[in-house]
Every structure is written in C-alpha cells, then in structure tokens.
Image (spheres, grey):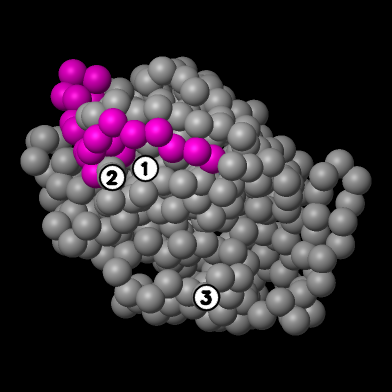
Amino acid sequence: MGATAAAGSRLHRESRRCILRPFDPKRAQTVSHPQNEVSVVPAKPRFSLIELEPERNASFGKEVERGLTDSPKSIPCRFLYDERGSQLFERICETPEYYVTRAEHEILANRSEEIAQVFPSPITLAELGSGSSSKTRLLIEALLRRHGGLRYLPVDISRTMLEASSMDLIDRYDALEIRAIASEYRAGLRHVGAETDRSKLIVWLGSNVGNYGREEAARLLGNIRSAMASADRLLIGIDLRKDRATLESAYDDAQGITAEFSANLLSRINRDLGGHFDLTRFRHRAVYHEGEGHVEIGLVSLQRQRVAIDAIDLEIDLADGEAIHIENAFKYSPAEIEHLAALAGMEVERSWLDSRRRFSLNLFAPM
Ligand SMILES: C[S@@+](CC[C@H](N)C(=O)[O-])C[C@H]1O[C@@H](n2cnc3c(N)ncnc32)[C@H](O)[C@@H]1O
C-alpha cells in the first residue's frame, strides 16, 4: 500500500468526499482532570475535547490477552481504529464493493432537510462513532440552515480522527460549536445524556450497530434511549439483509484494502504491545452466515505457528487454518429493525431506503 503517515504525525488525507488537514498540537493544550478524564483546550474558540479513557493501551493489552487466550480466539473490533486503521476505513468507503457509505450518503443527501424540520431550536447533534464526519456534514448543513446555530457532540474512540475532523468542521462552519468526546460509546453517552438544555438528535451511522450481536445491540440502544428525552430522536443507519456475493465482496474488496484494515490489527499489536506477528502468515476472510444474517470477519492462520507478545508476556499457539475473529456485521430486515427498536423502548418513526434498496436510515423515537 501507499506510504503510511509518519509515526506520531496527525491525520492528513484527501478524498473526494472530505479534506482533513493535519491537527496542529500547537493549537491545543491538554488539561488533566480527576477520574481519568483529559480535556484538550484548543487555542480556538467553539471547540473542546475531552478524553474519557486516556489509558487505552493498558486496556488494549488486557483485551488482547483475554481474546487471544479464549476459544475461539478474537480481538474486539473497536481496536481496528487506531490512526492507520481510521485512514484505511476511509479508503474502504471509496471501494466499488463497499456500497454502505454511498447508499447512506444518498439517503442523507435527499432527506437531511426533512430531518432538520423535525426539531425545534436550539438543537444539539450528537454522533456515535463519528469518524471523519463526512456524511454528517449533510445534516450539519441542513440543521444550520434551519436553526442558525448548532452544538455538535461527536463521540469516537479514535482521538486522532476526532481532532482532525472537528478542526476541519470548526474552520468550515462559523455557527458550529463542537464538544468532542474521545471515548467508547457507553461512556460518551453519559455526557450526551447530560445535555438536557436543548432538544437532541443522536446519530449512529454506517451500520455500526451491526458490529454487535442482536441482543447486545438492543442493550446498547437501551443505553442510547436512556440518554434521550421524549422529544429527542435517534437517526440510525442499518444495513439490510441481501445476497451473499454482494455482502462478502463488500467486506473483502478486490484491491485488498479491507484485508489490510484487518491485518493492521496485528500490526498494532506488534507496534503497541511488542507483538511478533508475521502478517504474511495470515489471510483475511469474510463469510456470510445467511441464517444468522451476519458477515463474519477474521484473520486465518496459514500455518501452525507460535507468536509472542512481549508487553503482556504472552505466547499463543495457532493451528493451521485457525481463525482470529475480528468482527461481525449483522444485517437486518425491516421487521428485525422494528423489533430491535422495540427491545430498546423505541419505535421506528420514519424509515428511508436508498434507490437500490440496499440500506436503511431510520428515525427512532422513544416510546
Ligand atoms: C465503521 S466507522 C464509521 C464512521 C462513520 N460514522 C461512517 O459512517 O462512515 C466506525 C467509527 O466508530 C468508531 N468506533 C468503533 N467502535 C467504537 C466504540 N466502541 N466506541 C466509540 N467509537 C467507536 C471508530 O473509531 C470509527 O470512527
């Protein structure tokens, strides 16, 4: 693949959808708080960032140890999104096979004005797993047109991506205020829930809910519901069940970018935890299990091997053909979406599909 960004440098990429400039650390200072919180106070008005889990490497080590000593072996998918992983995900979105981003973009381009009309002013837009926030701009622009000003609370575990995308938005929109939260969803939701002085639109795009098993997804949606008042709404992108060939190629593109995204998890263990994975001894695999309705993504060992990870004092044995599970991508039928909403104490108020009926965007209201 192309040259990687120099270690420690900030995100710098250009795509046809968005341009993210490098985050300049000189523009910000870091302030530590009790309770493991760190705030970034930028030399720029309208922007603040709090990091709720700064000791991420410690938890990475623990989770890797737990997952690789389990049977079957696994590594939680949230660790895919270090700086390099976030860059690779943006490239996946541009592959011909990964229809998810284009389909959701199409719906947002057609429906953002309509969605913006639902809310009285003033309004807070909160986003879970905001990433580059590139599709979210469609909503931000519609909400700014309708309401004049907007407070935006992006929540993402990838701090580098969060900083870079926030600075880009701040420079682009004068009437936007950003309170970024670098954390996992559940911790971030506690901050989102504390935002009670305005009506809230919480968005969770990209079918990220599909990374959770169906029961776990309902529990997480229950957490989101707890952060909502009765007038608040959740806008959630959910991918639909479809044919095997489309799904398997979406998660295993011909250029091999998704495979590189998976392998980056092993590179991250090598880099951050002193791991000794040889990437040439693994292959990426994406298999659709039609009955369960999920694509299972993993890395398969191409031979019998033993791998040491120095920082956590671990040696693991892998059999020839043994897989390390990385993520599932659950797909839903319209009936399953209604059931999911109901399990979380919500109902589907509106639902929109893209023109090829591959993907759904849903407005959930508290019941
Ligand atoms: C598949 S990308 C989607 C990005 C963007 N929302 C989109 O639709 O293109 C998932 C994003 O969620 C973030 N993420 C993944 N797991 C997370 C977690 N458990 N808590 C917070 N953020 C998470 C990742 O860092 C990444 O930016």
Query: Viewer-proximal residue, 337 or 61?
Result: 61
The residue identified by callout 1 is 207
Label 2 secondary element: helix
Q: Position of residue 79 (x, y in %)?
A: 51, 45
Query: Viewer-proximal residue, 95 or 310?
Result: 310
Which mark, residue 6?
A: 3
Q: Earlier in the sequence, mark 3 or mark 2?
A: 3
In the picture, measured across the screen, residue 31 lies left or right of residue 329, that is right
In the picture, measured across the screen, residue 179 lies left or right of residue 64, that is right
Query: Which residue type carries mark 1?
Result: Ser
The residue identified by callout 2 is 281
Q: Cβ–Cβ below 8 Å for labels 3 and 2? A: no
Q: Earlier in the sequence, mark 1 or mark 3?
A: 3
Crowd rating for badge 3 (residues with CA inside 10 Å; few <14, some 14–19, many 20+): few
Q: Residue at x 40, y 33 (%)?
A: 306
Q: Is residue 31 magenta?
A: no
The image quadrant where one finds the N terminus is: bottom left
Query: Which residue type carries mark 2?
Result: Arg
Crowd rating for badge 2 (residues with CA inside 10 Å; few <14, some 14–19, many 20+): some
Q: Residue at x 53, y 80 (%)?
A: 21
Residue 290 showing in the rendered view = yes
Q: Earlier in the sequence, mark 2 or mark 1?
A: 1
Q: Is residue 327 above or below residue 138?
A: above
Q: Position of residue 94 (x, y in %)?
A: 26, 65
**Magenta-tinted stretch:** 283-309
Label 3 secondary element: loop
Q: Residue at x 68, y 68 (%)?
A: 177
